[in-house]
Image (cartoon, rainbow, N blue to C red):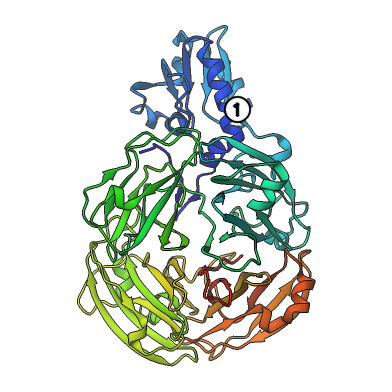
Amino acid sequence: MLDIQTFDARRGGNVLYKALVHPLAAEAMATLAAELRHAGPLAVFDPDGVASALYALHPDMPPATAYYVQDVGALGATLAGVPAQPVTELARCGCASLLVAAFDAARTEQRLALVAPPGLRILSLDRARLPDAMLTVGRPYLDRLNFATNHAFFRDEDGICTRLVSANYWAGYGARAVRLWLRLFDAAGRVLATWEQALPDHAGGFTIDSAELRARFGLGPFTGQLFIHAIGVAGHDVVKYALDVYAGTPGEAGDTALSVTHDANAWPSDRYAGLPAPDAGDQVLLWVQNSHAAPIPAGAITLDRMGRNSPVPVPQAVAPFATMAVDVARLLPGIGWPAQLELRTGRHVVRPRYEVRRGAHAHVAHVNVERADLRPDPGIASLQLLGRGYLLPFPVLPVQDFRSIVQPNPMAEWQDSLPIRLDVFASDGRKLAERFLGNLRRDHDLVLDLEEFGAQAGHAELVYDFREGGQADGWLHALFRYEHRRSGHAADTSFGAHVFNTAMTYRDEPQSYSGAPPGLTTRLFLKLGDRLRHSYAVLIYPASAAWHPFSATELQLIDSGGHPIETRPVRIACSGSAMVRPHELFGAEALDRAGAGGYVLVRDATCRLFGYHGLMDGQGCFSLDHMFGF
């Protein structure tokens, strides 16, 4: 496992991690490593305890022959077996160079000159700084807004194309002149193209399309990853997007593939869950994408049936920034749906995608971060002030056309206890059914078809239910699978539970898009479709406790420059839902005015909605994943 710290719920993201793995920083670190390798013995000064992460992410760095710290409490540490010494001993290091494992190190270098031996060359990580023109904030360098970065699975081959869609939501927080720095890698990790893209000064939408990139840069077919760095941002340091994977040119009929997934979550994890085993006749490919300049060793990534604890290693190594497909059935023969799988990546990758190939059709979805930091929270069982507490809402699509299937997923390393209930609601908020699902074990293979609960269309919610005991941590997740009865197309999506629509708070719930909880408003992004693929959304009004009887939702059509065109009201009952279709609400002429970068902003100042969105044509080809807000 890589010895790195990335993200935790208390402190947020580790900006140093992002600074070290940026592709430009990786190039500079390779140059620095080559220089130090030829300079003689190397000493490392580690004022912030980050040298282990530095070497993990850049293993070509020459080994340290001496290791120095300034915190007395760090004197028991080692760096690759070299014991830490107090920095006051630096004068006796006998090295040619000293690397200060820190950014913004000019003042530190001046202080070290007082205790350093004559002739010692002092360098720092400032040699791997991004150019000033790529920084949003001048100082400190490790300001989170300097590293609004993310990755995206990107593919254009075998008739399959990719399109990233988002909006300049940073403009709503006062940002101006926002631009994207982008780098496209192929499957081998080679750089195919590097470019910048300016965003509109208002909250306009934008797209990045694989077919357009091939034409612009004269590229051949590729499958790889797109690195995205947003510069000049405000408010959010997260790059959010919807990613469409589709067959052929937008607007062509006869699609064999259509998917939508949301942003990749820029922080690598040790484990991921929510990967389905292949159903009969299916092939499940796990797309492993190395997020770092360090290669992934053979065997460092493993797959296992959830709860078995007998991980099977992936025998191939993965080059820096490379992409590799792993056929799940080859690694785990005989394990099929409804079994679920656990992926251990050693923190080498951000949230991976998987692809389900079913006959002539295919769809792409994502796994989720399995938490190592969570423990059972006995307070959840006594949250009477929060009503039903944590809710995991998901759509029930119209039963005459779709099957809606749910599978609860363990999503924390400790979890061997899932005490849950299923509540089913009609679109108008009436509760149609409930079923206690038991205190599920980690290796359960329970799946439910929502047709048996009587909902023609609407939504359902998973909630904690402790009638037979059990423990909970608030990180309740599930996989939702939708199958079109006539065409055979399918879509997978997954998400986790939150507390919704109550004025009381517990820990960081109900979450807010910005600011402290409780989050009681809505701002969701809904993309537009094209000539044959119309966009749609299922908007759900979940409520942990009693709240407004109806929502006061507005759908605002925004053009590509970020300017509102028209607004339509939508009224959703508490515990109800609504399917909205922009082409029906606004009409073709208004959508044409919105343009290719137009989108719909789902806005509500009275309640927090949760939504799922996708594209749908008239032939049963569809996609579905949860929406993102800002």
Q: Position of residue 245 (x, y in %)?
A: 55, 59
Answer with left or right where residue 59 lies relative to residue 379: right
Instruction: Describe the element under mark 1 as helix, strand or loop.
Output: helix
Answer whether residue 622 is visible to the viewer in this image.
yes
Front residue of this view, candidates 448 and 50: 448
Q: Nearer the viewer, residue 374 or 455?
A: 455
Q: Is residue 544 found left or right of 532 in the rendered image?
A: left
Determine which residue is flagged by label 1. Answer: 28
On the rendered structure, is 116 left or right of 388?
A: right
Amino acid carrying label 1: it is Ala
Residue 201 picture quarter: bottom right
Q: Nearer the viewer, residue 40 or 384?
A: 40
User: In which quadrant of the rendered image does the C terminus lie?
Assistant: bottom right
| Quadrant showing the N terminus | top left
Q: Can you give x and y, in whole percent of width and height, for residue 397 in the image?
A: 47, 81
Q: Residue 485: x and y, percent?
A: 43, 78
Residue 614 lies left or right of residue 10; in this view the side is right
Q: Position of residue 129 (x, y in %)?
A: 63, 32
Identify the residue shown where x is 40% and y is 70%: 480
Relative height, residue 116 to residue 310 (above, below): above
Can residue 114 be seen here? The reply is no
Q: Quadrant of residue 421?
A: bottom left
Q: Residue shown at 45%/63% (left/top)?
A: 360
Q: Is residue 363 above or below residue 327?
A: below
Please count the marks in the image: 1
Circle 1 packing at 10 Å, graded few (<14), some (14-19), many (20+), is: some
